[in-house]
Amino acid sequence: MSGLRITAIVPTWKEEDSIRSTLLSLRAGGLDEILVVDGGSQDDTVHRATEIADRVFGVAGGLFTQLNHAAREACGDVLLFHYADVKFPRAGRKAIEDTLLSQAVVGGSFSLSFDSDRKRYALIAQGANLRNRLGIGPFGDQSIFVRSEVFWRLGGFHPDVLLEDLHLVRRLKRAGRFEILDETVRASVRRWETNGFLPTLYHHWRLTLLYMLRRGRGNEADAATARTLRMARGG
């Protein structure tokens, strides 16, 4: 074992239906610390998270402001940014530790799968994993992890940038090796089902294209846009 201490950071906003099973998957994965940072849920999210997480914070200002706040409170050598309706694999900790045995590796992510047997979601996951290998991605629903000192050396998340999870990955790749693990996380399809498969797919690729064209700046990256982005990715 590497001896690394790993902190999972889970942002939430109205996640009462999924937060318990997600946090239990992180517990089963043997992580050292679980922090939940809530963006103002008025349902039972915070109560359910408090029963399992080590600490729960309430932070306004959008997704990446939430993540930065929790990262400042974390005790881990490694920060794992894990969405509230994504299940962590039981062997995930070992996969992270094995990857970070090389000091050249600054961070990485898991491969993507969905909690559905429907063929179209398998195709979306395959496409996402291929896109990652081609250098576009991964996104936050693939549970990005990073050495804490590298995260802060790079200035943490930049909340004024659209698709800041992708932007962080690009900065990490410039700082060292970024590895995409074969181990998969399982993302929920509930937003795809609720908001419609084709509209969700459209939003996903539209926002990605905006980022790639360097147009996703300024006011577009407010809290509402961050929530729309999460909806578009289904995580």
Image (spheres, rainbow, N blue to C red):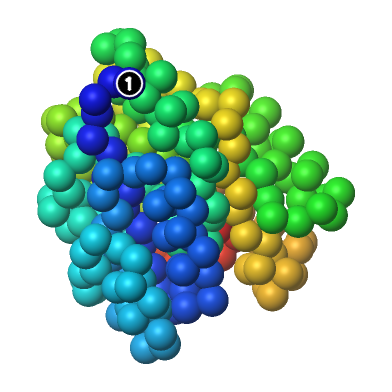
Callout 1: helix, strand or loop?
loop
Q: Is residue 96 above or below residue 118?
A: above
Q: Please state which amino acid type lies under the numbered disc 1.
A: Met
Label total for image: 1
Q: Name the residue nearer the viewer: 4 or 85.
A: 4
Q: Is residue 95 above or below residue 228?
A: above
**Residue in view at x 57 percent, y 31 percent:** 183
Disc 1 target residue: 1
**Residue in view at x 59 percent, y 26 percent:** 182
- Expressed as whole percent of the image width and height from the top left, the position of residue 54 reads 24, 61
Task: Assign the C terminus to one quadrant of the image.
Answer: bottom right
Residue 155 placement, left or right of 1: left
Of all residues shown, which one is farthest toward the right? Answer: 119
**Residue in view at x 78 percent, y 44 percent:** 122
- Expressed as whole percent of the image width and height from the top left, the position of residue 3 reads 24, 25
**Residue in view at x 51 percent, y 64 percent:** 21
Residue 222 placement, left or right of 140: left
The crowding category of the residue bearing disc 1, from other C-alpha atoms within 10 Å (few below 14, some 14 to 19, many at least 20), is few
Q: Name the residue nearer the viewer: 220 or 119.
A: 119
Task: Assign the N terminus to one quadrant of the image.
Answer: top left
Residue 44 placement, left or right of 91: left
Of all residues shown, which one is farthest toward the bottom? Answer: 42
Q: Is residue 31 above or below residue 200?
A: above
Residue 44, picture quadrant: bottom left
**Residue 43 seen from this side:** yes
**Residue 218 seen from this side:** no
Residue 154, picture quadrant: top left
- Expressed as whole percent of the image width and height from the top left, the position of residue 81 reads 36, 47
Q: Is residue 106 above or below residue 187?
A: above
- Expressed as whole percent of the image width and height from the top left, the position of residue 226 reads 41, 62
